[in-house]
Image: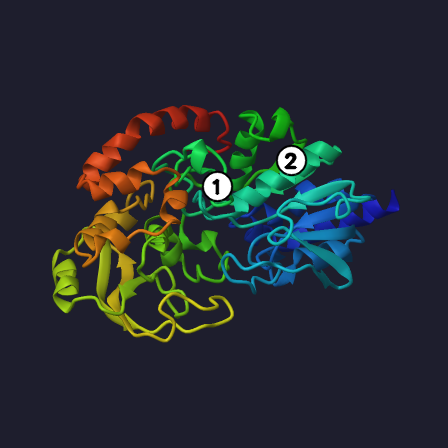
Amino acid sequence: MQKIIRVANFILIFYLFFNSILFSQSKSIDNMESYAPLLANKNVGLVVNQNSVIGDVHLVDTLKNLEINIISIFSPEHGFDLNYGAGENVQNSKYNNIPIYSLYGKNKKPTLNSLKDVDIILFDIQDVGVRFYTYISSLHYVMESCAQENIPLIILDRDNLHSNYIDGPILNKKYSSFVGMHQVPVVYGMTIGEYALMINGENWLSNSLKCDLNIIKLKNREPFNLNDSVLSYPPSPNLKTNLSIKLYPTLCFFEGSFLSIGRGTDFPFQVIGYPTIKTNFIDELISQKNKCYHFQKYSFTPISRKESRYPKFQNQKCYGVKFNSLSSDCETSSKRNHLINLSILIYFYDNCHNKNKFFNEFFNKLAGNSSLKEKIMLGWTPQEIRDSWQKDLKEFNKVRKKYLLYER
């Protein structure tokens, strides 16, 4: 009881001191009065990474200062310190003598050993709202383990720059993988807390298990006004800027091609290119004055670095384009939508000197089907492809609306 009183007193002081800050935040981690008392006198597991901070203090340290007993930490892809590149196995480690169990290596799901003596788990991970971003796959497995072991799960909700709209093809179950587990579109238009409710409600956990969920909601979320302050820190090593996150639903498809999107440079997911591109091809692309993008002719040389080991076209000079900003037509949209731009993808395919080698085997996993590649190869226009998604998107939106916690 004394510990609970100490926790409550600390939170009250924290809340009064930072009141003006709290009401401007878009992350539930700052709403300590809503979740810290639930952790008192319990053995706590945390699913966190470098983004889980209150001010400049990591959540682990903040909770330890409240005498919360943290016995396990779990880290998804990229690791606790965001020091691992995409697809790189994350090793187990420690933080202040607390074991950190990797959820992206030998095991992608918490093991029985890692959950031993855990009474409750707190989840605080910054998602970006795109299906092939693997944090929602880690969320699925954490929920499944909690359901199997009867461990309550608290999710500190976070917004993302794509939470107000839906776009892209729905995943075909045949193409289910860790970069796409559920039958949702590429952009599913939900916060991570809303997505967790959907996983539970649609019976996506094995054997239709239900996770004991508690979503700590966002305070003062303003619909259709997601400014760049939503993401205070990069959510992963190669999404360094808010612009790269906005471009991600479009440019990530190029990971399923032979082109580079700038891994191994200072501008990953902001450039496209390859070594033998024709100059007139780039000049023509820039002259078209795409209504959503401002870009320029650009050359870059990928090198191996911590966040991008052995990148595509390593040490080779590549020629292409760099995206500098989104146009005002896109940025001032009332819902701040950043729709998938098929025109860019199709333009590069149509002007490829060897179309048979444009796509690699990863493309269908990203698309969640084989039909997108087939339609591009058959010469479908961007609008024809987009029209082919609409029926499924309308059906998905009916499901999505059941789990929304905030006005859209």
Whether residue 140 sits left or right of residue 93 in the image: it is left
Query: Mark 2, mark 1: which one is toward the viewer?
Result: 2
Whether residue 120 sits left or right of residue 292 in the image: it is right
Residues under numbered marks 2 and 1 in contact, where contact means CB atoms less than 8 Å apart: no
On screen, residue 312 above or below 400: below
Whether residue 274 sits left or right of residue 38 in the image: it is left
Q: Which residue is mark 2?
A: 144
Closer-to-camera residue (5/112): 112
Q: Earlier in the sequence, mark 2 or mark 1?
A: 2
Amino acid type, label 1? Arg
Q: Which residue is mark 1?
A: 221
What quarter of the picture does the C terminus occupy?
top left
Q: Quadrant of residue 61?
A: bottom right
Tell me residue 83's x, y (percent): 56, 65
Closer-to-camera residue (116/231): 116
Tell me residue 311's x, y (percent): 42, 66
Query: At numbered mark 2, what does the secondary structure look like: helix, strand or loop?
Result: helix
Tell me residue 281's x, y (percent): 14, 62
Amino acid type, label 2? Glu
Tell me residue 366's x, y (percent): 39, 45
Q: Residue at x 40, y 27 (%)?
A: 396
Q: Residue at x 44, y 59 (%)?
A: 239
On screen, residue 369 above or below 102: above
On screen, residue 277 above or below 343: below
Instruction: State whether residue 196 appears in this view.
Output: yes
Q: Residue at x 17, y 56 (%)?
A: 351
